[in-house]
Amino acid sequence: MALRNRTGLVTALLVGLSTALPLPAAALDDTQKQEFGAFIREYLLANPELLEEMSQALEIKKQAESQQMAQAAITDHKDAIFHASEDAILGNPDGDVTVVEFFDYNCSFCKRALSDMTDLLKKDPNVRIVLKEFPILGPDSLAAHRVAMSLRKIAPERYADFHLALMGGDVRATEDRAIEVATGLGVDEAALKAGMEDPSIGASIRQTYELANALGISGTPSFVIGDEAVFGAVGEEALLEKIANMRECASTSC
């Protein structure tokens, strides 16, 4: 039996029982409450799979509510999400579809998703990827992201190589490791450290935290494509499908 029909049956039974019992003063007395509770317990013990189905229904409802919240936030903060001047852009800066990624350099799932993003750039020359620096995995992550943002200001032409090297490495991203990667690309260490103190870096990170909160994003990687927030490393094929749908019908789902 379909999930909707099964959970609907349970609801109907519960409503039927509650209406069958007399309700003095719009409430059940203690005896009626006991009878009602005993019936529910007996029914669920006889049909334990309903608990799983109800849990699934609840999860679907929560996901729908989360997506509604995200869609409202995307509408309210479109420029800050898609066109913040502080964000790095990979791929085609004038691409017809934008994929926004919230990431942390120490996120293992972000590292796994890196190949999805690089393959996406190779396969689609007209996609625009916006990188949201979202350090949520401790002080090391925060410091590494500050190095990244400083590098982008003083040597933007080196950022893509830096990003791929730091994200693609197996070593934990720290300030020292990020500086090592940057200087290996020819970026001056003194200038890099001085740039890390720029107040605009902290302001940009705070704005990203606020956007993530509004979108309901609490983990990485997370993406925004069109009017949809995509939570987790969903894989290259899922991203390609959403991008294709955006081109076909201006929505991630046609």
Image: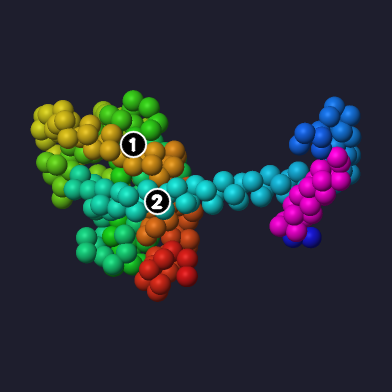
**Front-most of 31 and 197?**
31
Q: Residue 88, relative to residue 24: is it above or below? A: below
The type of colouring in the image is: rainbow
Residue at image position (86%, 45%) is: 20
Q: Main secondary structure of the magenta part?
A: helix
Residue 11 appears left or right of 187: right
**Front-most of 109 and 40?**
40
Q: Any mark on residue 72, and which? A: 2
Question: Would residue 180 be seen by someone viewing this image from the given angle?
Answer: no
Q: Quadrant of the N terminus?
A: bottom right
Amino acid identity at mark 1: Tyr
Amino acid identity at mark 2: Ala
Element on which disc 2 rests:
helix
Image location of residue 143, percent across then percent down:
28, 29
Q: Nearer the viewer, mark 2 or mark 1?
A: 2
Element on which disc 1 rests:
helix
Residue 150 appears left or right of 127: left
The image quadrant of residue 163 is top left
Residue at image position (89%, 29%) is: 31
Which region of the structure is painted magenta? 3-22
The image quadrant of residue 250 is bottom left
Residue at image position (31%, 40%) is: 208
**Front-most of 8 and 85?**
8
| Residue that label 1 marks | 209
Question: Would residue 246 be seen by someone viewing this image from the given angle?
Answer: yes
Image location of residue 101, percent across then percent down:
35, 49
Q: Residue 10, relative to residue 249: is it above or below? A: above
Q: How many marks?
A: 2
Image location of residue 148, percent across then percent down:
23, 38
Residue at image position (11%, 35%) is: 188
Q: CA distance from mark 2 to mark 1?
A: 17 Å
